Amino acid sequence: MRTRPIIGVTLDAEEPGGYSKLPWYALRKNYFSSLAEAGALPMALPHQTELAEAYLDTLDGLLITGGAFDVDPSLYGGGPAHPTVTLKAGRTDFELAVTRGALARNLPVLGICGGQQLLAVALGGTLIQHIPDTVAEALEHEQPNPRDQPGHEIAIAANTLLASIVGKTRMAVNSAHHQAVATPGEGAVVNAVAPDGVVEGVEHAGYRFALGVQWHPEYAVDPADPLIFQAFVQACRG
């Protein structure tokens, strides 16, 4: 019997240029180290959509990571794409397939930043394509200061999975997004909001563990951030 649950971690992908003359996968180390420190065995998942079910046969849980791109608005009835929208179709196709597969198997799922938005779409939710054009007097959600520093606070809804994990009603979070969840999907609920009303987290009580957070807890900006990984890994132990 293995002592560490195997958690699949979705990768980011870039076309040739910069780091490599060939297409490449990459992901910040702190996603993996946060999971390992919480007791998991992280496994990177290349974007082979046809292998999504085979991956899931091996996994005890799924972490959907963030990245500098957006979910195609056509996937949630969002209408024409805003000029700021950047797509990575191959990544999104894979992430939707593996997320829907994980939910169908009731495997624990944690979505971070763009991964939270992807989870909301997988649950039938919708997104705001560009916060500055939609939310009056919005905060600067693409914070100018470094990501290992807080950008703003959030208010956490009572009687939610997130509240039970972090044990408090407010947290300091970092912020690196121009989109946000508009509606969380049928049966899903919003578990946290920013001072300007922008959704900062979603969850669905109909699954063993289906949680999304808009910030990046792998930076541990708030002392409660590691608790999110600990609760996720514990859920993956079954």
Image: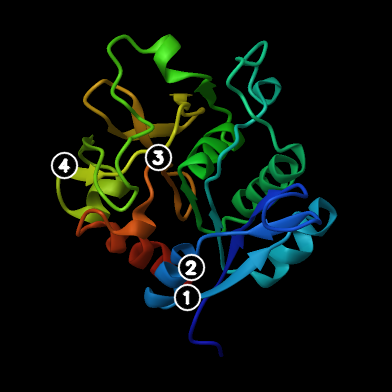
The answer to which of marks 4 and 1 sits earlier in the sequence is 1
Residues at marks 3 and 4, CA–CA distance in whole angstroms: 14 Å
Choose between 25 and 179: the one closer to the eye: 25
Q: Which residue in the structure is indicated by mark 1?
A: 40
Q: Are marks 1 and 2 in contact (CB under 8 Å)?
A: yes
Quadrant location of residue 134? top left
Rendered position, 215 above or below 126: below
Disc 1 element: loop
Picture quarter with the N terminus: bottom right
Q: Earlier in the sequence, mark 1 or mark 2?
A: 1
- In the picture, measured across the screen, residue 223 lies left or right of residue 91, that is left
Spatial CA span between label 1 and label 2: 9 Å
Rate crowding at label 4 as few (under 14), some (14 to 19) or many (20 or more) other CA atoms within 10 Å: some
Which residue is labeled 2 in the image? 236
User: Gap in Å between the C-alphas at discs 1 and 3?
Assistant: 22 Å
2 or 4: tag closer to the N-terminus: 4
Residue for point 30% across, 18% down: 138
Residue 130 lies left or right of residue 124; in this view the side is: left
Residue at (38, 76) in percent of width and height = 37
Asked whether the residues under the numbered discs 2 and 4 touch, taking CB atoms below 8 Å apart as contact, a structural biologist would say: no
> Of label 3 and label 2, which has the lower sequence position?
3
Q: Which residue is mark 3?
A: 214
